[in-house]
Image (cartoon, rainbow, N blue to C red):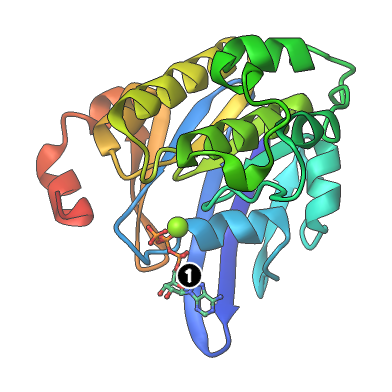
Amino acid sequence: MLQIKSINTYYGDSHILQGVDLHIPVGKAVGLLGRNGMGKTTLIRTLMGYVPTASGQVDWHRRNVTGSTPERMARLGIGYVPEGRGIFPNLSVRENLIMSARPGVNGRQDWTYDRVLSTFPRLKERLEHGGQQLSGGEQQMVAIGRALMTNPELMILDEATEGLAPLIVQEIWRVIGEIRRTGISTLIVDRNYKAVLNNTDSAVVMEKGRIVMAGESSELAHSSDALKRFLGV
Ligand SMILES: Nc1ncnc2c1ncn2[C@@H]1O[C@H](COP(=O)(O)OP(=O)(O)OP(=O)(O)O)[C@@H](O)[C@H]1O
Ligand SMILES: [Mg+2]
């Protein structure tokens, strides 16, 4: 479904992504692992069109979409929950969710306002709260809920559990499971590599802008020496 081929990305003179390939098959969950600063967010920002790619190609359903704007990528069916959440602080929870609502590209409407609220019951009690009045966990729920309201084919979650209390983290992983069960593909970045491997079909490890390991998540879970080396865990 999403195929990234030999992507090279620079920030100024720094060569950040150095020939990255990544494939996300329809309906599959893919984990993206790597220590701080290895290029995970840059890869996501490149494929979403926030950062221009110097060379390489992004294909979506076998169509070349390299260089598309983030708006176009979203319209094509990619829901993106960025690091640091990015909800609208001046809008209420209700407004944040409603303004994102639309059927999926394929006409699917699995994720409605009501379904998002029953998935995150905590938000029901805070519908009129503004973004600033929410806890970090609640903001993350709104961010995920907003992406779901677009009925995406692919959800990208960059550090969705960062800085959240253990119970909320559990809650987020539960929702990621539910997202997978509705057939949405996922690309998941998270510091907890065990949780990533438990919740994905396959995974890749990035080091200094390159993919240095890739495989089925269940198999990678047994390569603990290599994981320790690359992840510093
Ligand atoms: N806007 C930017 N301008 C210049 N350099 C940047 C910018 N954003 C990131 N970098 C650099 O690019 C490299 C990759 O950063 P990136 O954010 O992609 O890493 P990451 O794997 O997502 O790390 P983290 O786990 O900390 O989120 C780092 O060396 C970082 O310092
Ligand atoms: Mg990052």
User: In this rendering, would 219 be left or right of 223?
Assistant: right
Q: Quadrant of the N terminus?
A: top right
Location of residue 69 (image quadrant): bottom right
* Ligand 2 visible in quadrant: bottom left
Location of residue 5 (image quadrant): bottom right
Q: Residue at x 35, y 22 (%)?
A: 170
Query: How many other residues sit within 10 Å of disc 1, few (<14), some (14-19) or many (≥20)?
Result: some
User: In this rendering, would 35 be left or right of 183?
Assistant: left
User: In this rendering, would 24 be left or right of 105?
Assistant: left
State whether residue 218 is above or below residue 53: above
The amino acid type of the residue labelled 1 equals Gln
Residue bearing the label numbered 1: 18
Distance from mark 1 CB to nearest ligand 1 atom below 8 Å: no
Q: Residue at x 65, y 44 (%)?
A: 131
Q: Residue at x 69, y 50 (%)?
A: 89
Q: Position of residue 95 (x, y in %)?
A: 81, 34
State whether residue 23 is above or below residue 7: above
Q: Position of residue 14 (x, y in %)?
A: 48, 84
Q: Nearer the viewer, residue 107 or 115?
A: 115
Question: Quick check: can you spot residue 65?
Answer: no
Q: Position of residue 137 (x, y in %)?
A: 47, 35
Q: Position of residue 164 (x, y in %)?
A: 37, 38
Q: Residue furthest bottom?
A: 13
